[in-house]
Amino acid sequence: MNITKTNTEIPFPSLESKINWWVTSLLQITFFGLFLFFFCLFVLGPVYGIYKRGWEAMLSAALVCWTISLLILIPVIRYFFIKRKKVANKIVIDGSGLLFFNSKNQVAEQILYKELSSSKQDFDIYTVAPVGSSMVPLLEVSLQQEKKYDEIRRIDMNLPLHVVKNKVPLYAHFIHGISVFRPDLKIDPMVLRTFSINPNTWEIKKSKGISSGSWLLILAVLVITGLICGFVFLLSR
């Protein structure tokens, strides 16, 4: 595998992700509230039904609910509870590349400048906006692999159950690092326009207040919370 050498001795400041703790708290409360609600409805609910009506009346419904619960709860518990210490909760961009750290301050994932490769197209660094992604577009790069074809990687400056409030500066800093340490790679001018980056100063236009994506997230949290409260109220009547 031909790995491009990178001069990491060039002075380059590091940038760390910043978390919007207010919106993150709403997101986590909603997530764990839904998790508890789902557990009570599909796991404890059938148990209560069996207790009240007996096995013969509730066995079929209980098996269906428990099967659905296993398919959903096992991956969630495995990812967010059992392996929570391995899940990234911090992003750092420095002279080596893009690093994702877990709660133990260990590198959980990384994309190094020296691993980047040419896309064999007009440009090597693109932006993409897949359906269902965040309001901020994703960055698309190619990584050198030992297999025949290079791997295309889409970089998302998001963290599980955390709301990163400086995603755009993180993208801009990583792109700046590519221009410094990998001048052989061509950056699509649309990338700079998308993130409002000045290629001379590498500064971006700072937005004021909460972004539209954060407002949508807050609205979704409030709607879901209202639906849960309404459903619980109906059940309690």
Image: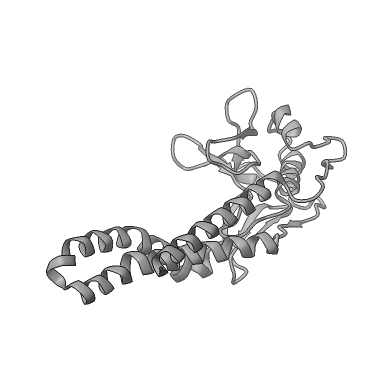
- Which residue is painted at 71% across and 39% down in the image? 182
Above or below, 154 relative to 17:
above
Q: Is residue 67 left or right of residue 191?
A: left
What is the quadrant of residue 185 in the picture? top right
Above or below, 32 relative to 189:
below
Q: Depth check: 197 or 176 in front? A: 197
Looking at the image, the residue that sits furthest to the front is 237
Q: Depth check: 232 or 193 in front? A: 232
Q: Depth check: 100 or 67 in front? A: 67
What is the quadrant of residue 204 in the picture? top right
Q: Position of residue 136 (x, y in %)?
A: 66, 41
Q: Position of residue 144 (x, y in %)?
A: 54, 40
- Which residue is painted at 82% across and 45% down in the image? 206
Residue 78 visible somewhere in the drawing: no
Q: Is residue 40 left or right of residue 31?
A: left
Above or below, 80 relative to 11:
below
Residue 93 visible somewhere in the drawing: yes
- Which residue is painted at 16% across and 73% down in the image? 54
- Which residue is painted at 50% across and 68% down in the image? 84
Q: Is residue 80 left or right of residue 208?
A: left
Looking at the image, the residue that sits furthest to the left is 56
Quadrant placement of the C terminus: bottom left
